[in-house]
Amino acid sequence: MDFTFTEEQQAAVEASGAVFGGVAPDGVPSPALTAGAVADDFDRALWAKLADADLLSLLLDPAYGGAGLDAIALCLVLRESAKVLARVPLLESTAAAVTVQEYGGEETKAELLARAGRGEVVLTVAANGRTGHEPAERAVSARQDGDVWVLDGVQTAVAWAHGADHIVVPAHTDDGRTVLALVPREHEGTVLGEQISTSGERLGELRLESARLAARQVIDAEGAWERLRELLTTGTCALALGLGERVLEMTSAYTGKREQFGFPVATFQAVAVQAADRYIDLRAMEATLWQAAWRISTRASGTGGVGAGGVGAGAVGAGAGGALPVAGDVAVAKIWASEGVRRVVQTAQHLHGGFGADTDSPLHRYHAWAKHLELSLGPAAAHEEALGDLLAAHPLG
C-alpha cells in the first residue's frame, strides 16, 4: 500500500507554494472595517500567476493544455491557497471546467476549456439554491422550447459571480432531471444583484427570468451535477483544512512567545491541551479529505482497490463490495471540516486573547473566512443524517 502523494501531485504543491508565497492575507481592507465589499473583483494579478504556473489547467486533459491530474492535486493546491486567503475562484472555475470536460458537448469544450486553463475565461457555480437551505437544483426550473432552454428561478450567494464570465447553474426539469446551464454573466433575462459574504467578498444573487439558452449551453447528462457538487464540496473541505493549519501555526507561534508569570503560555497545561485537541481535529479533517478526494478520483478514472497508487491506496475501492457510495466519504469529510474549522478558529481566538480580535492582526480575517466556509459546508448534523441514510441503504458487512 502506498499512501504518499505522486510526483505530479507533489510538483503541484511546489508550484502553488511558489505562487502563493508572495500573497499577503491582509492585502485588502478588513471586512470588519468595510461597509461594503472588500474589493470589487478577485485578485486578477494572482489569477494570471496561477495561469502562468499551469495551475488553472491541472485537471484538464492535455488536449486542452492541461496536466490531466485528479481531484487530489486540486485539493493540495486549494489547501495552500487557503493558508494565505487567496482571493481567486480557483475551486469554482476548475470544478466547472472539469465537469464541462467530462459531460459537455464538443463545441462547448472547444470554446471554453483551453481558454479556462489559460485564465482567459473564468467560470463559477451557483450552488446554494434560493435561500442556502435547499438543494441548489430545485431553485431554478428548466424547460425546452424548441431548440432552446428557458430558465426561471433564483440562486443566492454565488461566489465570484461579478467577475466570472459564465455561471454554471443547476436546474430541474419537469420530469425530475437535473441539467447544468452555462449562463453568461451578462445575458438577456438575467439579473445579478450584490451580496456580501462574512469574509467581505462580493457574492451575487442571480435571478433568471425566462432566460433563453442555446442547447449547446446546457449539459443534459446524468451524473453531471453530482460530480460537480462532489468536487465543490471536497474542495471546500481542502480550503478549510489549509486555513485551519495556518491558524494553528499562528496560534503556536503566538503562545510560544507570549509570556505570563515569566513563562510562555504555551507551556501551561490548559493551553497545550486545547492546542492538542485542535491538532487532532486537523488530522481528522486531513484523513477524511484525502479519502473523499481519492474516491472521487478513482471513480472518475475507473480505478479502485488496493494499490491504485497515490494517497488513499489501500482504502476501500470505488467498486469494492459493501463500500458506501462516494457521497458517504464526502459526508464524513464535510462533518469534520465544518465542525473542525470552527473549533480551530475559536480556540485560536481564545488563546490569542484580545489580539485575536485586533484588526491589525490577520487572525480576525481568518476567522471571517472560516465562518464563510463553515456556512458553505452546512451543519454537521445534516451530514450525519445523510450518512445515516446511506448506511441504512448500504449495510456494510
Image (cartoon, rainbow, N blue to C red):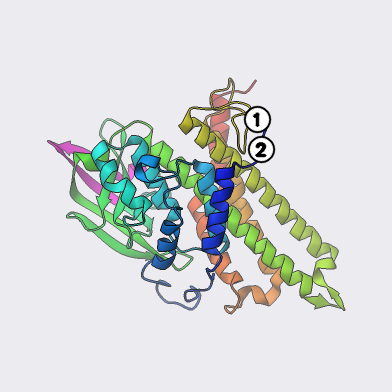
Marks 1 and 2: in contact by CB < 8 Å?
Answer: yes
Amino acid type at circle 2 is Phe
Magenta stretch: includes residue 389: no
In percent of the image, x 22 and y 45: which residue is there?
Answer: 151
Q: Secondary structure at mark 2?
A: loop
Residue 93 makes an appearance in the image: yes
Most distant residue in the right direction: 262
326 horizontally vs 113: left or right: right
Q: Is residue 375 above or below residue 252?
A: above
For marks 2 and 1 on the same chain, the one whose residue lies earlier in the sequence: 2
Q: Which mark is residue 314?
A: 1
Magenta span: 136-154
Query: Quick one: 228 or 110, which is closer to the camera?
Result: 110
In percent of the image, x 63 and y 32: which residue is there?
Answer: 313
Q: CA distance from mark 2 to mark 1?
A: 8 Å
The residue labelled by disc 2 is 3
Query: Which percent across, then down, holds residue 109?
Result: 29, 42
Crowdedness near tag 2: few (<14), some (14–19) or many (≥20) residues, C-alpha within 10 Å: some
Amino acid type at circle 1 is Gly
Residue 238 makes an appearance in the image: no
Query: Which percent across, then down, holds residue 249?
Result: 69, 63
Query: Which quadrant of the figure has residue 8?
Result: top right
388 horizontally vs 161: left or right: right
159 horizontally vs 69: left or right: left
Q: Is residue 337 above or below residue 386?
A: below
Q: Secondary structure at mark 1?
A: loop
Q: Is residue 75 above or below residue 393?
A: below
